[in-house]
Image: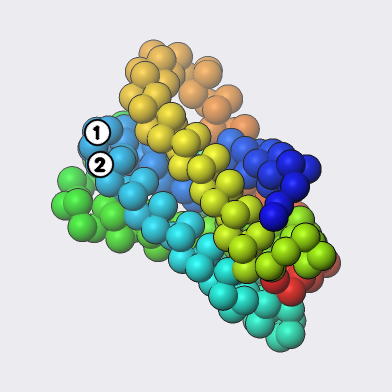
Amino acid sequence: MIGMTAVLGVGAAALGMVLTPGPNMMYLVSRTVSQGRRAGMVSLGGIFVGFAVYLAAATAGIIAVFAMVPALYLTLKLAGAAYLGWLAFKTLRPGGTSPFVPGELPADPPRRLFTMGLVTNLLNPKIAVMYMALIPQFVVPEQGRVWLQSLSLGAVQIVVGIGVDALIVLGAGAIASFLTGRPLWLRAQRYVTGSVLGAMAALVATDRARPLPA
């Protein structure tokens, strides 16, 4: 049985992460703006499955392997930091664009949209950190089965994450229309997004925390 403190803690952390610009948000926004809401929702389906994969791994105790083999965790963490840094560079470099600018992306079929959503989420360092280091901190062995607590808290994260991402997909078109005729706002949005991504890359790379056994 999980306590309300754990539910609120994981829910707040999940909300903070999903509202922070990252790979999932940028992919959903770019696909929705370029190909429509239906494409955004199909992509969101892939992201949902990615969450489910992380949840299954955490519940089965597979993620605890990272606690026993720190080199694996360090490799994944540095790879994630490099990915965030690359996204930050793409956004901030001269000539960089905002994900809210309609692009000439090819219209991908539903299967590819779904697959790219899944892969983007599986490679998202924010989600990896959530399941490896944050959720285990709210698991209390004395309060019941560890796997059931991990499953319940992971479900809280998924509900919050998917709910907010769905709102982002539904509102991406309206936000893009608002920013298109306002270049200063668009430039500010690009700089804020790039700066946040860069700061996150630095934080992930320098964080000395190790994953806790699930």
- Spatial CA distance of label 1 from label 2 is 6 Å
* Image disc number at residue 130: none
Q: Position of residue 99 (x, y in %)?
A: 42, 37
Query: Residue under circle 1?
Result: 36
Q: Foreground residue, 188 or 27?
A: 27
How many marks the image carries: the answer is: 2
Q: Position of residue 14 (x, y in %)?
A: 63, 44
Query: From what the image shows, is residue 4 above or below residue 146?
Result: above
Rate crowding at label 2 as few (under 14), some (14 to 19) or many (20 or more) other CA atoms within 10 Å: many
Horizontal side of residue 166 vs 82, given as left or right: left
Q: Secondary structure at mark 1?
A: loop
Query: Residue under circle 2?
Result: 39
Query: From what the image shows, is residue 11 above or below residue 188?
Result: below
Quarter of the view holding residue 135: bottom right
Horizontal side of residue 103 vs 110, given as left or right: right
Horizontal side of residue 37 vs 52, given as left or right: left
Q: Position of residue 76 (x, y in %)?
A: 61, 72
Rate crowding at label 1 as few (under 14), some (14 to 19) or many (20 or more) other CA atoms within 10 Å: some
Query: From what the image shows, is residue 101 above or below residue 57?
Result: above
Quarter of the view holding residue 204: bottom right
Q: Foreground residue, 65 or 200?
A: 65
Query: From what the image shows, is residue 5 above or below residue 63?
Result: above
Q: Amino acid at mark 2?
A: Ala
User: Image quadrant for the N terminus?
Assistant: bottom right
Q: Residue at x 52, y 18 (%)?
A: 185
Quarter of the view holding residue 128: bottom right
Q: Residue at x 24, y 33 (%)?
A: 36
Q: Position of residue 162 (x, y in %)?
A: 46, 42
Q: Secondary structure at mark 2?
A: helix
* Residue 33 visible from this viewpoint: yes
Q: Amino acid at mark 1?
A: Gly
Determine contact: label 1, label 2, CB under 8 Å: yes
